[in-house]
Each structure stands twice: as structure tokens, then as C-alpha cells.
Image: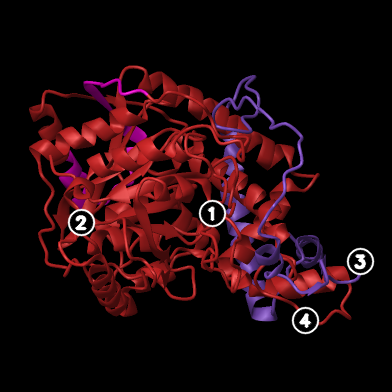
Chain colours: A red, B purple
């Protein structure tokens, strides 16, 4: 099996290679909006990009929000430090939905475009990470997922996206969206490269109290469970392609069985309640004088000053702050927030029961790649409902991987495999095995660099 | 949610909206909250709320002061007077 990292050899003088790479990348970026900035002084190492909500020392890190414009962190995120120590070279910061609020890469100043067809979405919120992985042959992306922000864009852009068990990769240096849901993960063109960067990035970090010191396992499963309720809302073309995929799995001597988990649809409201509640407190730190955007009128009292600064948030960020403030309010807290936490406990228990004997498998997204214009017409509830396949593993902190397995109408589609907590390497091993059997090819020329 | 409740919520959240934005977000909010109401139908038995998806041991680091060397870079993100950050009147 090929590893892009292992094969990486510039053969040119490093400085010339990187200068040419950056020049070509900037040209492509004008059309696709994958990167928010580039590291023009990159002259060595295997190139890695970093989602714009992860801090890189001295580099503008905005989470694609106007409120963080000009913010340059004076430190590196732990994951960035660990990769740099392993001869990885920082390439640039990738575009995303503002603070991670979105599944399609359009909730930001410069909406992202799919590299297979720029009329279509790239997915989100790690839109730029997925585009960069698709258009750059030698590259690994550091991304982040709260409710599906790695799987969704990986599927729409035809690359591998891995989200680890919650707590396995340090969140130190991550600009928080929802602390109990955020996970730093990776995208690459093959599962073997994901394995390599995961190896370098795990381990307890004293700067993140939720980071864990655990040994990740690689215990294979021969059985795949399909949750019936998740198949109900699939687009017909996705269902048909997925059924063929399941047949291929059977051909590889895996067993496929169908199970019921009738409460699974409650994962969406539970996720949006918890994530909005946590986001509304996390975003309270942007007060107009500590980070990024500055309010210059010091005659304003604190509350007015604070309110003035928060006009910089985009529509979706404002919506989630208001929503989060509502579900945390004393009169409804038990009805929404506490209840959502109990639903998470219940779904976690039920999914873990299924995962003892099998992986859970589904398409990554229930629809084929939508056009940007079509997503803009959706109401928030219609939009949130499209996360039904990616939210359950994220809500429960389970390791999962999305990988490309076919095309529909010239656009790639992905499947998602979920494993037990800490059995992270097993889902990666499965995709390595799949890639050996059904080597994914970029069937359409997207002019990868 | 009536207009008075919505206005009070905006004040608590310190969010100021222009009129057209306000109408749209209020409508969105009502739709989303009614979607959240389906949580009422789920039987969670006696389960305790899961504040994290997995058990976090909650190990704290020792409370030992460390020198942060990049003070200048840190303060470059703010308006300062000597080593003090300038902020609004409380």
C-alpha cells in the first residue's frame, strides 16, 4: 500500500519546490477558497495544513470569523508542535465555517467550493482541509470535528477523514466551539497517512485536562452493523450505491447485519442543544479588546462595548449564541440542556452495545453533493437534519472514519465506519484493507498539485 | 416566544440585531426550539447526564507558576498602556 508521506521526495531544491507549490496553490485558491493564509517561508518538511481554528504561533488564526481578524496566537497548539517535531512543515491555515458552525463550508466570508465542480459545496466545517487534501498530492490536513466537520467535507471532496475518540488528541490551542464535543483529527488521501500522523499526535498533554493517556487498540471486527433508522432518509442514489458497497464488503468476507436503534434521531436535537449551550459560553470571551477585532470607543460601558464587538459575528454564530443562551436559561435548562445530556448518555450506551460485536457503517452524508445555491435556501432545521449520519459518533465521542468509495454524477461519495472508544486504529486498519482491495482513484482530473 | 421574551434573551446574550435580521432569527429560533421538543418523547430512564462522552479522570496539573515568555506577542493582540490591557469601563 502506498503512503504519500513515505513517497514524498521533492527531487528539486527544497526552496524551489515549495515556492512553486505555493505559487500554484495560491492560483487554485482564488477559485476554491481552501486557504485563509499561506506560510511563504516554508522550505522543508512534509507539508501539513492547519484548520483556522487551531493556533499556529505568530500566524493569524481567526476560525474564519471577522471577530478574530488580526489575532496572532503567541503559541502553537500541541498537535502542531508534535507534527513539527516529526519533520512536518506548516503550509497554511485552511478555511472553515465560522467557528465550525456549519456542514457545508458556506458560513464564512469566502464560501468554499468543491474541487470536483466549483458550483457545489465542499462540505464543512473543515471545508478548506478537505479541498487542500484533494488538490495536493503530498499533504496531510489537521482538521477538527464537533458534529461531523471532518467526515462531511472528506466525503464531498473524495478524501479520507478520521475523527479520533474524544480526548485522544490534545485540544490545547484549539479555538473552542463546544468543549465536550470538539476533537482534533486528520485528513489525507490514504488511511495509512492518517495512521502515521495519529501516532505522532496522541498522548497526554498537561495543557488539556481532558486529554487522555491511553493505549489505542487495533482490534478488528468481521461484522458491520447497519442501523435501520439511519437508512430511512437516504437519497435514492446514495442508498443504491451504499447497497452495492455492502455487497463488496460481503465479498471481502465481512458480515453485514441490520439493527434497530429507534432513538437515534434524537441525536440531532441533543447535539444542537449541547453544542449551542457550550458555544454560547465559549464565544463570550470575544469582548472587543482581548483578541482580534477591537472596539475603539472606550466611552461605552462594558455591556454596550461587548454588544458592539459581537456585531462582527455572522448570522449562524448569532443564531447559535442566542439559542445556547436560551437552552441554558434557568426556566428551561432541565427541559432542554440536562435532557440532551441524558439522551447522550442513553445513545452512548446503546451504540456501545452494538459496537462490542461490530463496526457501525453508513453512508457519510444522506444526500449527493448539493449545489451551494441549494444549501443557501434551506431553513436551519432542514440544514441540521442533514447531519443525521455524522452526529451520533460525534455526540458519543466514538472514533470514526469517512472514506471515498464511488462517484455519483462526477462527484465523490463517502462511507463512514464507527468503532468502539479507543479502538481507533481498527477503523483505520479497515480502510487500509479496503484501499488494498478497491484502490480509490481520482477518476476525474481536478488538476491536483 | 413573544417579542418581550425575545428582546430579553438578546440582552442576556449581548447580541444586537437589525430589524430584518431580528425577524428572521426569531422565526428560526421558534422553529429550532419546537424541533428540540422531540427530546421530551425519549425515555432516558434513570440515566445521569453525560457532561462528557467518556469518563474524564479530571487530572489537574500542579499549581506551580510558570513564566510565559512571549509576553510581547501576547500583548500585541491588545491595546496596552505599559503592561496593562486597556478595556472598557465596568
Name the residue tied to disc 4.
Answer: A296
Name the residue tied to disc 3.
Answer: B90
Which class describes the residues within 10 Å of circle 4: few (<14), some (14-19), or many (20+)? some
Residue A303 can be seen, yes or no:
yes
Q: Position of residue A285 (x, y in %)?
A: 72, 59
Which region shows up in magenta? A217-243
Taking the spot 40% from the left edge, 44% from the top edge, the residue there is: A390
Discs 3 and 4 carry the same chain letter: no
Which class describes the residues within 10 Å of circle 1: few (<14), some (14-19), or many (20+)? some
**Distance from label 3 to label 1 (Cα)?**
32 Å
Question: In the rendered structure, are the residues bearing label 4 and label 1 in contact, judged by CB atoms less than 8 Å apart?
Answer: no
Label disc, if present, on residue A412 of the rendered structure? 2
Q: Position of residue A4 (x, y in %)?
A: 20, 50
Which class describes the residues within 10 Å of circle 2: few (<14), some (14-19), or many (20+)? many
Label disc, if present, on residue A76 of the rendered structure? 1
Per the image, label 1 sits on a secondary structure element best described as loop
**Badge 3 sits on which subunit?**
B
Q: Is residue A153 left or right of residue A405?
A: right
User: In front: A419, or A273?
Assistant: A419
**Badge 2 sits on which subunit?**
A
**Distance from label 1 to label 2 (Cα)?**
34 Å
Taking the spot 16% from the left edge, 36% from the top edge, the residue there is: A434
Amino acid at each position: 500500500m502506498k503512503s504519500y508521506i513515505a513517497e514524498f521526495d521533492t527531487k528539486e531544491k527544497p526552496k524551489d519546490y515549495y515556492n512553486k507549490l505555493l505559487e500554484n496553490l495560491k492560483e487554485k485558491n482564488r477559485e476554491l477558497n481552501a486557504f485563509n493564509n499561506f506560510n511563504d517561508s516554508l522550505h522543508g518538511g512534509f507539508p501539513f495544513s492547519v484548520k483556522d481554528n487551531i493556533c499556529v504561533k505568530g500566524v493569524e488564526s481567526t476560525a474564519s470569523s471577522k471577530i478574530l481578524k488580526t489575532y496572532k496566537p503567541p503559541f502553537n497548539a500541541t498537535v502542531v508542535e508534535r507534527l513539527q517535531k516529526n519533520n512536518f512543515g506548516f503550509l497554511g491555515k485552511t478555511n472553515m465555517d465560522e467557528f465550525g458552525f456549519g456542514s457545508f463550508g458556506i458560513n464564512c466570508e469566502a464560501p468554499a467550493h468543491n474541487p470536483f465542480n466549483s458550483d457545489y459545496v465542499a462540505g464543512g466545517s473543515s471545508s478548506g482541509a478537505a479541498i487542500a487534501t484533494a488538490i495536493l498530492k503530498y499533504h496531510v490536513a489537521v482538521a477538527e470535528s464537533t458534529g461531523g466537520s471532518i467526515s462531511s467535507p472528506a466525503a464531498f471532496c473524495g478524501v479520507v477523514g478520521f475523527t479520533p475518540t474524544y480526548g485522544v488528541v490534545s485540544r490545547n490551542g484549539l479555538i473552542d466551539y463546544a468543549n465536550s464535543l470538539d476533537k482534533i483529527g486528520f485528513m489525507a488521501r490514504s488511511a495509512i497517512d492518517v495512521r502515521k500522523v495519529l501516532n505522532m499526535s496522541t498522548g497526554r498533554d498537561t495543557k488539556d485536562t481532558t486529554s487522555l493517556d491511553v493505549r489505542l487498540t487495533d482490534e478488528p471486527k468481521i461484522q458491520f452493523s447497519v442501523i435501520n433508522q439511519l437508512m430511512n432518509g437516504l437519497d435514492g442514489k446514495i442508498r443504491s450505491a451504499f447497497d452495492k458497497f455492502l455487497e463488496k464488503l460481503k465479498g471481502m468476507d465481512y458480515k453485514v447485519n441490520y439493527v434497530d436503534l429507534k432513538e437515534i434521531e434524537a441525536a440531532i436535537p441533543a447535539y444542537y442543544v449541547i453544542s449551542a449551550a457550550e458555544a454560547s459560553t465559549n464565544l463570550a470571551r470575544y469582548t472587543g479588546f482581548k483578541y482580534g477585532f477591537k472596539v475603539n470607543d472606550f466611552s461605552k460601558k462594558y455591556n454596550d462595548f461587548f454588544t458592539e464587538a459581537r456585531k462582527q459575528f455572522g448570522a449562524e454564530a448569532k443564531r447559535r449564541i442566542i439559542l445556547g443562551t436560551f437552552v441554558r436559561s434557568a426556566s428551561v435548562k432541565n427541559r432542554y440542556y440536562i435532557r440532551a445530556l441524558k439522551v447522550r448518555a442513553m445513545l452512548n450506551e446503546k451504540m456501545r452495545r452494538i459496537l462490542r460485536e461490530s463496526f457501525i457503517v453508513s453512508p457519510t452524508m444522506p444526500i449527493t453533493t448539493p449545489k451551494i445555491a441549494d444549501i443557501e435556501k434551506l431553513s436551519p432545521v432542514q440544514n441540521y437534519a442533514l447531519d443525521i449520519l455524522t452526529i451520533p459518533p460525534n455526540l458519543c465521542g466514538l472514533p470514526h472514519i469517512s472514506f471515498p468509495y464511488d462517484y455519483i454524477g462526477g462527484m465523490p461519495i463517502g462511507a463512514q465506519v464507527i468503532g468502539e472508544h479507543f479502538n481507533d486504529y481498527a477503523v483505520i486498519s479497515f480502510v487500509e484493507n479496503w484501499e488494498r482491495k478497491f484502490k480509490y482513484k481520482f477518476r476525474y482530473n481536478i488538476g491536483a498539485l | 416566544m413573544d417579542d418581550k421574551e425575545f428582546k430579553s434573551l438578546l440582552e442576556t446574550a449581548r447580541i444586537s440585531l437589525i430589524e430584518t435580521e431580528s425577524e428572521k432569527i426569531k422565526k428560526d429560533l421558534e422553529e429550532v426550539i419546537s424541533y428540540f421538543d422531540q427530546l421530551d418523547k425519549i425515555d432516558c430512564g434513570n440515566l445521569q447526564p453525560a457532561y462528557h462522552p467518556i469518563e474524564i479522570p479530571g487530572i489537574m496539573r500542579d499549581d506551580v507558576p510558570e513564566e510565559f515568555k512571549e509576553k510581547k506577542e501576547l500583548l500585541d493582540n491588545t491595546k496596552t498602556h505599559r503592561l496593562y490591557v486597556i478595556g472598557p469601563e465596568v
